[in-house]
Amino acid sequence: MKVIIIRYSEIHLKGNNRDFFESVLISNIKHVLSDYYYEFGRSNARYVIRNFDEAYTEQILDAVKNVFGVYSVSPAEEVPSTYEDICNAAVALTPVYGTFKVNTNRADKRFPIPSMKLSADLGGKILEKNPNLKVDLFNPNTVVSIDIRENGKTFVYSQVIKGVNGMPVGTAGKGIIMLSGGIDSPVAMYMMAKRGMTLRSVHFHSFPYTSMQAKQKVLDLAKIVKKYTLHMTVDVVSFTEIQTAIHEKCPEEYMITIMRRFMMRIAEKLAHKHGAGAVITGESLGQVASQTLESITSTNSVATLPVFRPLIGFDKDEIIEIAQKIGTFETSILPYEDCCTIFLPKKPVTKPRLSAVEKVESALDVETLVNNAMQSIEVVEI
Ligand code: ATP
Ligand code: MG
């Protein structure tokens, strides 16, 4: 019978919490497979998908390998643990070129042939079928694996597809990610989901200064990353009144600094409203004027919750590499404006002093502006 073996990763380490981590992982795997028929089982420290429609093998493998907590997946043949069945399945996997070896794990000591001997024997059978192959025990192109389980069944497989690793989403608390249409914040979202956080997004837009396409782009990005976060809601906040007020009442070089503080205040309010314990941004140290240590200090000082910046030490190239891997890059580089690009000062302060920022900001009725923005929220379920 064709099956899919799922191996899991770091959660092995979680001692007493292991049951909790596993139950979240299993429910996440079932979530991504909700469109398919299958049976879910366990075998030692792995899960096994059985009785699925083989036509969907690739789709199931792809969905499962992208669930955080999954270490690897293998399409496999599950056969009764008899020499003949194992031999047929192993020979059927005979590679077409290069080098190979057979690796046997005999968990069931009732099986009469020791693992080394079985490997050598099956290696011989595979060579008989394709004499062009060579055995290489140290660096083979293909490893044919034989896993003889205690239940009288054996898995035979040669393909091990790497999963995304990380921790199951839902095991590390909840965070509000500040999601822009740029390259960085979708990557930041992926990174925190990878550590097991449940995420909800906030996006600030300045209609009519920013277009509906700019907002749609952010929703499109949220949809792409949802493959990893599993659930996604975006709170779209109107930022127009705040930006207009800053533009009118504050020196222009402080525009970005003060905008950032408003964004942070609103993100934090949303965190409290939705039971989240952290705010996440896509900032990377020194990338732009608003991401110097002084700028980050001035934004951070309005926050009381922890603010996570998973990209803080990344180069742009490294961020782009991840964006390409997770499929957000092409959307991120579409040329729609962000609210940060309107009223853009010619010379933003790069090293704002907190006391100066607070003084400049005192021209504004912060509380009313924040409350109005909270009233403006459009909740979008992705
Ligand atoms: P990104 O590529 O994520 O847009 P960036 O390099 O353009 O980042 P900034 O524009 O300075 O950097 O934004 C820094 C961070 O502030 C973003 O990563 C994001 O978390 C947050 N942010 C910026 N603009 C918005 C917005 N319109 N809505 C929500 N969050 C935003
Ligand atoms: Mg940006």
Image: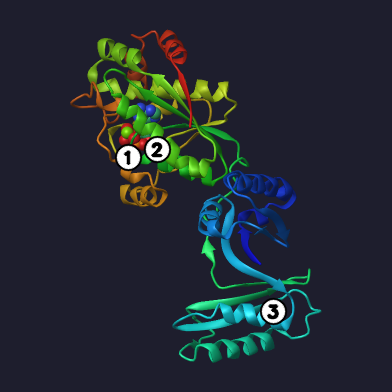
Nearer-the-camera pick, 303 or 17: 17
Q: CA distance from mark 2 to mark 1?
A: 7 Å
Vertical side of 249 occupied by 347: above or below: below
Mark 2 Cβ inside 8 Å of ligand 1: no
Three-letter amino acid code of the residue under disc 2: Leu
Mark 1 lies on residue: 332
| Cβ atoms under marks 1 and 3 closer than 8 Å | no
Q: Is residue 251 visible?
A: yes
Nearer-the-camera pick, 194 or 64: 64
Q: Secondary structure at mark 2?
A: helix
Q: Position of residue 130 (x, y in %)?
A: 50, 88
Mark 1 Cβ inside 8 Å of ligand 1: yes
Q: Quadrant of ligand 2?
A: top left
Q: Position of residue 363 (x, y in %)?
A: 33, 8
Mark 3 lies on residue: 85
Vertical side of 247 occupied by 327: above or below: below
Residue 111 falls in image quadrant: bottom right
- The tag earlier along the polypeptide, 1 or 3, is 3
The residue positioned 72% from the left and 83% from the top of the image is 83
Q: CA distance from mark 1 to mark 3?
A: 51 Å
Residues packed near mark 2 inside 10 Å, few (<14), some (14 to 19) or many (20 plus): many
Nearer-the-camera pick, 303 or 25: 25
347 to the left or right of 70: left
Mark 2 lies on residue: 221
| Cβ atoms under marks 2 and 1 closer than 8 Å | yes
Please, which colouring scheme is shown? rainbow
Q: Among all residues in the image, which is located at the extreme left?
A: 346
Q: Is residue 352 visible?
A: no
